[in-house]
Image (cartoon, helix red, strand yellow):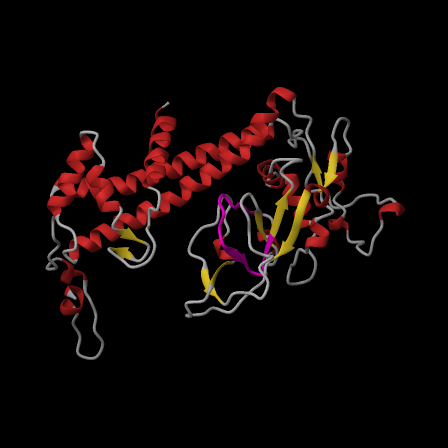
Amino acid sequence: MIATREAGGAVQKNLYLYNFDTIPIPKIEALAQKYIGDKVRQAERLRAWAKVLDNQITNFHLKFIPSQEQLNLSKKTRMVSSRKLTERLDAHFYPGVVDEYLQADGVEVKELGLISMSLFNGQTQDETDSTLFCMQITVTNLSKYFVKGEPRNVIPPNKFDRFVKKHDLLICNAAHNKSYIGREISYVHGEKKWLPSTEVMVIRIDRKKIPASFVRTYLLTKLGFLQIQSTIRGITAHSYPGDVKTLDIVIPNVPQQSQEGWFDCDNLMSKAGLAHEVATYLTTCAKYLIEALIESNLTETQLIQAQQALESGDNTLDRQILSRLKTDGFDGEDESLFPDLDQLYDLLKQAEEALSA
């Protein structure tokens, strides 16, 4: 409203730089500012902790993946045995460096399809404003780590067999630039009712055989990326489940004493994903608190008292404020932004201890 009032111009309204000098900005007490700012700082710590966990998991798995440092990834030609010929004869589909690596002494491999429970593409649905909807994720929601952003509300499909499950791996399977395919592999960290779009491929690992986080780590190596790239077909660059199933994955010889920690990496990955998700909610929380102050739904005094209580070790007032936050705003009508406050405080404590160690 203030910016609109300050805008000038007879035909087209414009807001000039000098106008900003006259716009009054409300200033709140330092403790109230700290209370809001701490939510953002907590979010930053959770994201930092999530990256630390991901690095720990990656480094743990890389110990069991033969080194790829000496590989000549630029090699474009190779000899192909007649027994391995298929309808694909282009050199890129047969990157010789892959065979050299996978056929080395002591390397055991299995096709991805043999260690997966299922491998499929999603199903694109039209967006809807109806109260009957499901949430759909697209390639824009994928990242190198976890699903990001807000899913779309779409018309529910007739069948529900393509929804993601916890520990699924998600990759882009179609792009105008083929370099995007396989470059990022998102890990589904929780039980989410998400329907992937047609351009998202789901790899559901049989976690009784091998950790999903290990397969993700391997596919994110230079050689793993090259293998995924070798499955791309067509001018518009598509990768299909049938081709991806044939990719050979290194099966490491993990010592018995390391087996439990190896499989537990999936749980750590899930925890890292949860920390990353809660960090997003904390950032949203700070925004909603500012809006609540502006709209007089919350007072500076309440924030100051909550901050003072937190500094003395009492989170009762903080709980009261956070419990009023909904996904659609302060005192909104949707579901709680933080449905489990005990979980929130536990994550913050773990992150603080881990980053200060």
Q: Residue at x 18, y 29 (%)?
A: 312
Q: Residue 97: tell me if it is visible.
A: no
Check the picture and name the quadrant holding the N terminus: bottom left
Relative to residue 246, is residue 326 drawn left or right?
left
Total labels drawn:
0
The answer to whether residue 211 is above or below residue 178 is above
Query: What's drawn in magenta, residue-wise?
Result: 183-201
The furthest residue to the top: 257
Q: Residue at x 39, y 27 (%)?
A: 354
Check the picture and name the quadrant holding the C terminus: top left
Report the front residue among 180 and 194: 194
Q: Is residue 196 magenta?
A: yes
Q: Residue at x 33, y 55 (%)?
A: 327
- Quadrant in which residue 172 is drawn: bottom right
Report the front residue among 271 and 37: 271
Report the front residue among 33 and 322: 322
Q: Residue 333: tell me if it is visible.
A: yes
The answer to whether residue 111 is above or below residue 134 is above
Residue 193, position as x, y percentages in the image: 49, 54
Residue 44, position as x, y percentages in the image: 34, 39
Relative to residue 345, is residue 16 drawn left or right?
left
Residue 188, position as x, y percentages in the image: 52, 46
Q: Is residue 51 magenta?
A: no
